[in-house]
Image (tube, coloured by chain):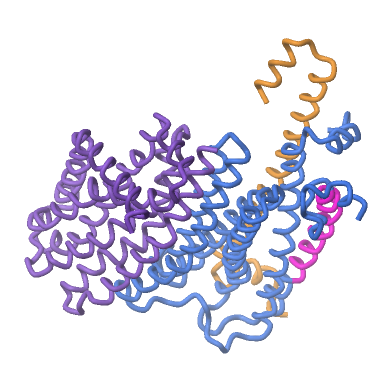
Amino acid sequence: MSRTLGPFAAVLRRDLLLAWRGRADVLVTLAFFVVVVCLFPFGVGAETNQLRSIAPGVLWVAALLATLLSLHRLFAQDHADGTLEQLLLSPEPTVLWVVAKVVAHWIATGLPLVLVAPALALLFDVEQGALGVLVLSLALGTPILALLGAVGAALTLGLRGGGMLLALLVLPLFVPVLIFGAGAVDSHLSGTGADAHILLLGGGLLGALALAPVACAAALRIAVE
Amino acid sequence: MQWESWSAFWQMGGAAPFVWGSYGITALLVVGELIMVMRRRKDALRRLLRLRRAKAGGSGGRRAFEEIVE
Amino acid sequence: MMKEMKRPERGKSLFRFAAPQLFYPLAGALAPWFAAAAAALTIIGLWLAFFVAPTDAQQGEVYRVIFIHVPAAWMSMFVYLIMAFWSAVGLVMNTRLSFMMARALAPTGAMFCVVALVTGALWGKPTWGAYWVWDARLTSQLLLLFLYFGFMALTEAIEDPRRADKAGAIIALVGAVNVPIIYFSVKWWNTLHQGASVSLTKAPSMAATMLAGMLVMALASWAYTIAVTLWRVRPLILERERHAEWVAAELDALEGKV
């Protein structure tokens, strides 16, 4: 037990500590999320019914973009200072510490979005009964984004113009998450129930958890090799 | 034969812009792709030949330059 | 046989033509035949499309776009699958040629994607009254085009060819796993939001000659894809293998001709 969890916990603790020390970066991601969401009423008008109907989509797209913007930080620092190479050379299974890094990244950047989202939803006059579904959909969906994004981040590691390239690579892959995530809130609001969406998101999370770390580990090995 | 006359054929029952537009754009894309493939082939071969000549006969400086450009 | 005996260290004796040295002339010999087949099939297909297939009872003549639209849409999906297949082969067996095949296929797949989208839009205007509707098929096709763009941009952006090959292979595989998920999710979204839009596939009562025309055009696009891919992979092979002796001999023969 401790033999497998040891390195996992160590990498997790280290990355969380680093995120805590560089918390200004984390706050920037959160601020970006808030500002983007607050831009929409200026663009589409502050008519309450309209805002209510676009709220789930707006919150989800903003969360997706905020995740995307934070992705490049996932491996860049470790790549620059050689930690990544050391980790790859270590006997510990790559997949294990890749998951640890992604989990730490999600706790630092994804979780704050999930927690702030209900407050933003109130700005759009979303009925309070739907806030739970919104939080649940984001809590299940943003880790999928982080896992898929990790593959993209590993593939574009150290490339010139990597940021735009990363967006081009992962945004099409994010579409199903966006559909089920925003759809969950929508269908709860329309009364059809969000169970199916939430289950699909959960299934997607399990699938991503099983496959993405393997692809990410392979991509990291290729990038550093 | 489906058409009463050639002009009926070209008019496509009033849908000429859409039908001929589709086929025209497809033809353009295919021809464009073929031209690009041929041009890429030529460029690649020229570059390889230049590289080889530089390696065979060129001065040291020239050679280094070609290696960098490569 | 002799060739593999000489180089047992490569360990691919089963697949003789996985050696770039043997594949290069083979590709050069085969490509013109496939190109000729593509041209012939296109002529037959267009003849079927315009002179044999009857006018559609519902749509009139506009439906004749189907003869390029559907084969192009099929082809764009097949090409992605083949790309993913070569990528998997490359990653598992570490054969350079498979990566080159994947990279040579991508632009043609993207081209067919664009053809499917443009013809879909031109067909949609008179049929649905709009160039674009967020129909499940059109939307998935658009996302597939983005996947192609991603693959091409990534392989172009990485300068080290070995890393570019493998990184491209991984994103191609990730994309291939996601294509069915994307299609399913878009379809789900579409039925919830859009209501039933006009389906692109026609009723089962489609005339046999229409189907025949479509199939012949599909075969033509297969032959075209093979020919173009072989032509595109040949210079790629030469560039990658330029330090090999056989490439030097090949270049000797080409000196002064290019």
**Residue A20 appears left or right of A86:** left
**Which chain is depicted blue?**
C
Q: Colour of chain A?
A: purple
Comparing A18 with A126, the one in front is A18
**Which quadrant of the figure has residue C108?**
bottom right
Q: Is residue B21 visible?
A: no
Q: Colour of chain B?
A: orange
Give the main secondary structure, helix, strand or loop, of the magenta stretch. Answer: helix
Q: Quadrant of the C terminus of chain C?
A: top right
Q: Quadrant of the N terminus of chain C?
A: bottom right
Q: Is residue B61 visible?
A: yes
**Residue at image location 85% in from the left, 33% down from the top:** C248
Magenta residue span? C22-44
- Residue C114 lies in the magenta stretch: no
Comparing B41 with C88, the one in front is C88
Comparing C72 with A157, the one in front is A157
